[in-house]
């Protein structure tokens, strides 16, 4: 008993010593939690918001950011019909292999094509963006801690640098970015897109919409997964109760 | 001793097979009527749960392998294809990824059970050592599996862990090159890791079989840690423990489902959704959560070779645990000091896990060192001397009559084992 006590004291002392070592330097500000429609066990995507978000991606983000894991055919999941998807695909020009003389050709994209990448390769992307590589956005929400909140906060987080911070050349100040300086200038400005449904295109609105869209591209399984999960949990709860009753009955005479 | 088996099964087909190859008789003996101590608590579910975990991992893994491509330029995209285009591929992959975590949770609790109730003591030393072999094989399998998606953590985790071997004097560098199949973690590394990741679960299955063979020779330990004295102390495995294990399986599946369906990436690192890039090092390279305690031990030593040795020793010490613990009493219920020390040991393991996920600076280094020191102190110093110093509580006479012989008015001496009285199992 006494040995255990002494050890406990010893261990606690270890924790209590060296205070102040928790101080952390240039960590990013944590992104505030947002009430997303896809949060929680019954969460679903907001189709209208996703479609607006796709418009933002198409007209703004996709000028620099690729989205290699996505196909145009996937867009039926955000509520577009097949004709719309065909038209969207056809408006992009993609590499179409070679012709009979071996020359590289281009052709309009089909729904079965991957989203068109803005640059032929990473080097081209870097050279057009001051040396920085715009990350692929297929998985951007899953590739960041609290991805949806982070992307939303980042898009809204551009501000003038505090007086004591010297922003590097070709860098922009954003309080939510780790290190606070990134090579992407504020991508959205008031009215950058014109929404067909008349929603005012404020920076906050566009960020919210494009985050809905990007959350879906990262987690296309989310709705099916949560719906199935609710059923599975209900079934297992029932099964647990039943199994418990069976066990009680089996063990009734044991003492 | 050749000769046909005299089968007692009535079904003619079963009887025909059983006469020539008595597997039905064996199953009946080992899983049907197998005499099992009747006083198990729910900690004894975790062996069955580990078995279920292994089966789930193999089943999902086989189907994932059908759709996975082990090539550095294709691996990441092939995993995304599984997630997006393979029917229920997301379900398979999330079950497999979270299944690894569930397997480790279950196995860690299973090991805690063995430590708390002294299941490693004679005559179960070999049984316990086979269990440690399974743990090591699981760790190797999990590590290689984490490399396969070829994300940033896959690549950098593989680089850090394989580089540990370079700490070995003289031959270290050669071993690392040999492991990699080249001069850095690259396609040959990914390819062999895939091959080994597919092989090792079947090695685990083999050792699990031996683990169970050994278990069925010695028989199970029990919460009182005393030997079975008479048939009154036992129950047939079926239906009593099949029923009891089923409850555990249901609860296990509930927790599992919660992870898979509602928080599938909770235990994963976001960086692993960024394709591997040898030119960009992540800010903090951290292994999967179940490796964090060992990672903390590794980093608590300023010398690389020392850290590697200490890390491997932290598990190797379990191999000799049956001889380090000198107390003849198995269950912690009757060991008042050990009962507390083991909780301190669990705390030190948890502290190590916490520290392993933090950058190696400031307070975390101090904490990691204190916890590492306790881990070894516990096994190498305290357990050997405790067996001599500690005065165990009086042991019950038998499992079915857990009455302690002692003078009627003795008063002190600690509480009696409450769970061992009349109806032990009925109170959840």
Image (cartoon, grey):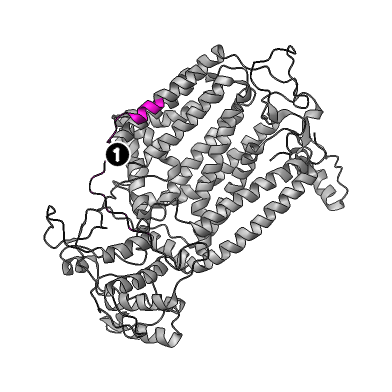
Is residue B112 visible to us here? yes
Residue A10 x/y as whole percent: 40, 23
State the residue in front, B405 or B200.
Answer: B405
State the residue in front, B199 or A77.
Answer: A77
Considering only vertical position in the picture, is B65 above or below B221? below
Residue B163 x/y as whole percent: 32, 40
State the residue in front, A76 or A46.
Answer: A46
Residue appearing at x 74%, y 15% in the figure: B405
Is residue B369 visible to us here? no
Classified by dominant secondary structure, the portion drawn in magenta counts as loop
Q: Which residues are magenta?
A: A11-33
Residue A124 x/y as whole percent: 20, 69
Considering only vertical position in the picture, is A184 above or below A8? below
From the image, tell me which residue sits under label 1.
Answer: A22
Residue appearing at x 42%, y 35% in the figure: B351
Q: Is residue A17 magenta?
A: yes
Considering only vertical position in the picture, is A42 above or below B113? below
Residue B308 found in image quarter: top left
Chain letter for the residue marked with disc 1 in the picture? A
Residue appearing at x 34%, y 85% in the figure: A198
State the residue in front, B394 or B226.
Answer: B394
């Amino acid at each position: 008993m006494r040995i255990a006590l002494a050890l406990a004291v010893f261990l606690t002392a270890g924790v209590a010593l060296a205070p102040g070592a928790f101080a952390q330097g240039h960590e990013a500000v944590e992104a505030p939690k947002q009430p997303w429609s896809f949060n929680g066990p019954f969460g679903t995507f907001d189709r209208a918001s996703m479609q607006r978000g796709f418009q933002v991606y198409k007209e703004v983000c996709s000028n620099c950011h690729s989205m290699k894991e996505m196909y145009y055919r996937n867009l039926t999941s955000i509520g577009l019909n097949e004709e719309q998807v065909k038209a969207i695909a056809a408006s992009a020009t993609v590499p179409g292999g070679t012709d009979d003389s071996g020359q590289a050709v281009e052709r309009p994209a089909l729904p079965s094509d991957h989203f068109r990448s803005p640059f032929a390769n990473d080097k081209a992307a870097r050279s057009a963006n001051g040396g920085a590589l715009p990350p692929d956005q297929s998985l951007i929400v899953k590739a960041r801690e609290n991805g949806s909140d982070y992307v939303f906060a980042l898009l809204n987080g551009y501000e003038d640098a505090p007086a004591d911070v010297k922003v590097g050349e070709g860098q922009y100040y954003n309080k939510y970015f780790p290190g606070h300086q990134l090579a992407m200038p504020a991508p959205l400005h008031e009215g950058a897109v014109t929404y067909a449904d008349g929603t005012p295109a404020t920076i906050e609105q566009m960020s919210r919409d494009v985050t809905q869209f990007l959350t879906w591209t990262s987690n296309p399984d989310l709705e099916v997964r949560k719906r199935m999960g609710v059923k599975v949990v209900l079934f297992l709860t029932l099964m647990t109760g039943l199994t418990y009753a069976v066990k009680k009955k089996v063990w009734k005479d044991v003492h | 001793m050749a000769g046909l088996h005299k089968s007692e099964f009535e079904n003619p087909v079963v009887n025909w097979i059983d006469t020539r190859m008595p597997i039905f008789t064996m199953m009946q003996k080992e899983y049907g009527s197998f005499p099992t101590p009747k006083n198990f608590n729910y900690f004894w579910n975790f062996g069955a749960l580990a078995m279920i975990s292994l089966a789930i991992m193999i089943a999902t893994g086989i189907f994932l392998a059908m759709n996975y491509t082990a090539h550095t330029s294709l691996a990441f995209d092939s995993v995304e294809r599984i997630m997006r285009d393979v029917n229920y591929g997301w379900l398979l992959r999330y079950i497999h990824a979270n299944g690894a975590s569930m397997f480790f949770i279950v196995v860690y609790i299973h090991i805690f059970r063995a430590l708390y109730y002294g299941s490693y003591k004679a005559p179960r030393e070999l049984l316990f050592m086979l269990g440690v072999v399974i743990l090591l094989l699981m760790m190797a399998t999990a590590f290689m599996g984490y490399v396969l998606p070829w994300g940033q953590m896959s690549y950098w985790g593989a680089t850090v862990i394989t580089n540990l071997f370079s700490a070995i004097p003289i031959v270290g560098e050669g071993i690392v090159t040999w492991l990699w199949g080249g001069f850095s973690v690259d396609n040959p590394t990914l390819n062999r890791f895939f091959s080994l990741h597919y092989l090792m679960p079947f090695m685990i299955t083999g050792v699990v079989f031996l683990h169970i063979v050994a278990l069925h020779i010695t028989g199970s330990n029990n919460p009182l840690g005393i030997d079975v004295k008479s048939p009154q102390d036992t129950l047939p495995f079926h239906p009593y423990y099949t029923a009891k294990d089923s409850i555990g399986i249901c609860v296990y599946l509930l927790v599992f489902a919660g992870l898979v369906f509602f928080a599938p990436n909770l235990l994963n690192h976001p960086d692993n959704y960024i394709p591997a890039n040898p030119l960009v090092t992540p800010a903090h390279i951290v292994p999967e959560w179940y490796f964090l305690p060992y990672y903390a031990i590794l980093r608590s030593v300023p010398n690389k070779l020392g850290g590697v040795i200490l890390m491997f020793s932290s598990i190797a010490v379990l191999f000799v645990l049956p001889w380090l613990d000198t107390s003849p009493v198995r269950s912690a219920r009757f060991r008042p000091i050990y009962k507390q020390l083991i909780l301190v040991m669990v705390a030190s393991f948890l502290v190590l896990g916490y520290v392993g996920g933090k950058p190696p600076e400031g307070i975390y280094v101090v904490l990691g060192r204190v916890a590492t020191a306790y881990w070894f102190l516990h096994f190498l110093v305290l357990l050997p001397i405790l067996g001599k110093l500690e005065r165990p509580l009086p042991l019950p006479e038998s499992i079915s009559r857990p009455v302690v012989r002692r003078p009627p008015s003795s008063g002190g001496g600690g509480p009696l084992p409450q769970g061992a009285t009349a109806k032990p199992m009925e109170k959840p």
